[in-house]
């Protein structure tokens, strides 16, 4: 029994350390945490344009709820935080090639993504919603738009894009690089609706007043997570411990209140 326990503990230590060893017992790969500590810098991948999570101000600085969360991670690790911008579907490749250390970009935890990256515990719960022009006063559900001739705008690579292509069998799906592009296309009459995350649609409605309308109710329920390289167990365990302390802390509550409960910041950000 003691030998079994000892062996089990040794395996657990190796897993938590996140080490990869060759036949000679030499470490061949460090965890993200070890690399960040060594470089004294945490590189975060984001896709600005996802309000109110990932945005830029007129000076080109990254701002939003995800930015506050990333900065808090940096403070806990006592390292600088650097942000790099990608299209949403370019984030995972950037993580896999080591160009960034983590993805903190309102990314939904999904089974297909979990095959190529590892996710932290959820840090925010949201869902997909439908936005239509304000002049459309009759649409009450997505089913009413699933007819030939209708066009649904989505952000390429997003959960909303996958959901739309699964739900809509008759309407045409239009892919755009980012949510603002999809919403602008709808405003210009190129699309009949936008399917995207509810917080982003709520903020867009705040910014555009009576020009758009959110169809009541969520189409799906989702959890957002922080992504790191696949099987980086040490970093995932640390992130989960961080989130357990950060979520509902005074700092997180202040961030949540600023970005989700007020609109004063709307004039301080730019559309990508």
Image (cartoon, rainbow, N blue to C red):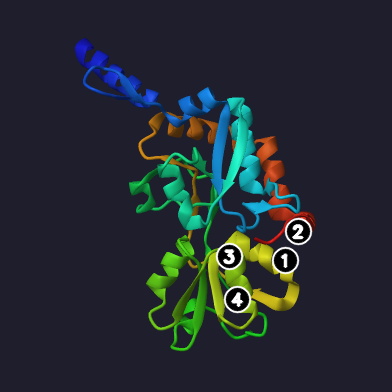
Q: Residues within 10 Å of mark 3 (few under 14, many from 20)?
A: many
In this rendering, position of residue 215 left or right of residue 63: left
Can residue 169 be seen in this snapshot? yes
Q: Are marks 3 and 1 in contact (CB under 8 Å)?
A: no
**Can you identify the residue that label 4 sits on?**
185
- Determine contact: label 2, label 3, CB under 8 Å: no
Dot placed on the residue nearer the N-terminal end, 4 or 1: 4
Count of marks placed on residues: 4
Looking at the picture, tell me which residue is in the foreground, 122 or 72: 72
**How far apart in space, not on screen, are marks 3 and 1 (Cα)?**
15 Å
Mark whose residue sits in front, 1 or 2: 2
Q: Which residue is mark 2?
A: 266
**Residue drawn 38% across the image and 23% down it:** 17
Earlier along the polypeptide chain: callout 2 or callout 3? 3
Quadrant of the frame with the C terminus: bottom right
Q: In this rendering, would 19 be left or right of 50?
A: left
Q: Residue at the location (67% across, 80% down)?
A: 134
Disc nearest the viewer among 4 and 1: 4
First reached walking from the N terminus: tag 1 or tag 2: 1
Mark 1 near mark 2, Cβ–Cβ under 8 Å?
A: yes
Question: Residue 166, image x and y in percent?
Answer: 38, 71
In this rendering, does residue 248 appear at all?
no
Label 1 and label 2: CA atoms lie apart by 9 Å
For label 3, the residue is: 179
Question: Which disc number belongs to residue 206?
Answer: 1
């Amino acid at each position: 029994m003691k030998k079994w326990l000892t062996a089990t503990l040794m395996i657990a230590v190796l897993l938590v350390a996140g080490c990869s060893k060759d036949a000679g017992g030499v470490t061949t790969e460090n965890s993200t945490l070890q690399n960040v500590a060594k470089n004294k810098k945490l590189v975060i991948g984001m896709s600005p344009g996802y309000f109110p999570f990932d945005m830029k101000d007129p000076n080109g600085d990254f701002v939003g709820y995800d930015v506050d969360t990333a900065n808090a991670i940096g403070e806990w690790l006592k390292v600088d935080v650097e942000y790099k911008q990608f299209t949403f579907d370019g984030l995972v490749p950037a993580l896999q090639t080591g160009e960034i250390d983590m993805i903190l970009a309102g990314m939904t935890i999904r089974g297909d993504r979990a095959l190529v990256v590892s996710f932290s515990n959820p840090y925010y719960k949201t869902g997909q919603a439908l936005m239509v022009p304000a002049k459309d006063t009759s649409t009450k559900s997505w089913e009413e738009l699933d007819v030939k001739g209708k066009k649904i705008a989505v952000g390429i690579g997003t959960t909303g894009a996958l959901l739309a292509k699964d739900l809509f069998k008759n309407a045409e799906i239009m892919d755009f690089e980012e949510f603002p592009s999809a919403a602008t296309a709808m405003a210009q009459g190129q699309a009949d609706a936008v399917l995207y995350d509810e917080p982003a649609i709520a903020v867009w409605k705040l910014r555009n007043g009576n020009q758009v309308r959110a169809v009541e109710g969520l189409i799906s329920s989702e959890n957002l997570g922080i992504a790191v390289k696949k099987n980086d167990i040490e970093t995932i365990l640390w992130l989960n411990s961080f989130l357990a302390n950060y979520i509902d802390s005074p700092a997180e509550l202040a961030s949540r209140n600023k970005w989700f409960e007020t609109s004063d910041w709307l004039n301080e950000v730019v559309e990508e």
